[in-house]
Amino acid sequence: MAVMVADVVTDYWSLGAEVDDLGDAVLVRRPGLPRSTFLHRLRPRGVEELDSALDAARTIAQVPQIVLDPDAPPFVEAELVVRGWRIDTSVQLVLPPGASGPAPDGPVRPAADADREALRALFRADHLETDRRSGRAARSEERTDATVEERWALGPSVHWFVADDGEGPVGFFASWAGGARGTGVVEDLFVHEDRRGRGYARALIGAAVADARVGGAGPVVIGADPSDTPMRWYARLGFRPTVILRSLTPPT
């Protein structure tokens, strides 16, 4: 199950991208969106093969991130940490096929093209809140714009939903049915902090899960920051903690 979840998550972030099989690794890239490039499925047998995989990737694109799956050789993470790469983690939770999740009620609807500017403003609010809470300097407007473009680049198989309070979108969430694997992904949950506590997040999750199931998904995966509280709420909704995924960012 853990390997399947890792594969589904990387499949999701590979949507709409160019994929290069390098032998001991797979490179996912989007020309013009360098921050969305990542290397995954690393299978080197030793340090020499790891360096060869990194060199091969760098001849094609800058590699800002490596995503590790449970089958990656353990020495890869240790070797890169010694070299100064930073570890980030996410906990992946799975809603089993027989669990329906919350009811998709409330003022939630599919996002329309006319909502794009409002969604961009919500992504900006999300970034500013996250950076403020973590004590980091606020990321740039250009970084937010790149994040939004990365999301649109995932393509039409990813369905976006918005919570609308009658004056416009106040929250968003995305759903992907998962294709041939039959395991869906719901991703990027956000409700503006001024509109929380009104059931919007629960309704967004319900709508996204229902959409993935209509598309053929059985299990549905959601990711969370292990240092944040939403993961406990997801567990109360029926999502079962399944695997910790690690990613590595090179030193600057």
Image: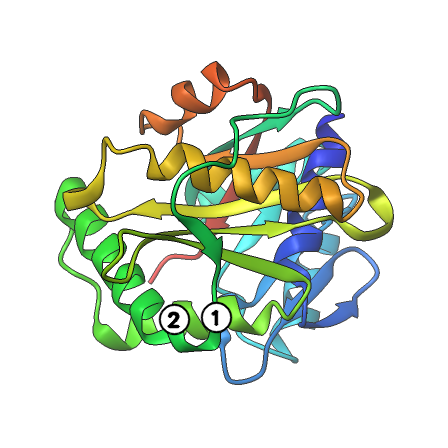
- Residue 53 locus on image (x, y percent): 71, 61
Which numbered disc covers residue 75? none
In this rendering, the answer to whether 150 lies above or below 237 is: below
Q: Residue furthest right?
A: 180
Q: Residue at x 47, y 63 (%)?
A: 111
What's the mark number on residue 112? 1
Q: Amino acid at mark 2?
A: Asp
Q: Residue at x 79, y 65 (%)?
A: 22
Other residues around mark 2 within 10 Å, as few (<14) / some (14–19) / many (≥20): some
> Foreground: 200 or 121?
200
Q: In terms of image quadrants, where is residue 78? A: top right
Quarter of the picture containing the N terminus is: top right
Judging from the image, what secondary structure is the residue with disc 2 in?
helix
Residue 76: horizontal and vertical position, in percent? Answer: 62, 41
Circle 1: element type: loop
Rendered residue at 71%/27% (across/down): 2
The residue that mark 2 highlights is 115
Residue 211 visible at all: yes
> What is the C-alpha distance between the residues marked 2 and 1?
5 Å
- Residue 114 vs 66, above or below: the answer is below
Q: Quadrant of residue 196?
A: top left
Does residue 154 appear left or right of residue 96 in this picture? left
Horizontal and vertical percent position of residue 228 = 31, 29
- In terms of depth relative to the viewer, which is nearer, 52 or 64? 64
* Contact check, label 2 and label 1, Cβ < 8 Å: yes
Where residue 117 appears, as percent x and y from the top left, is 32, 75
- Identify the amino acid type marked 1: Ala
Observer-nearest of 145 and 89: 145
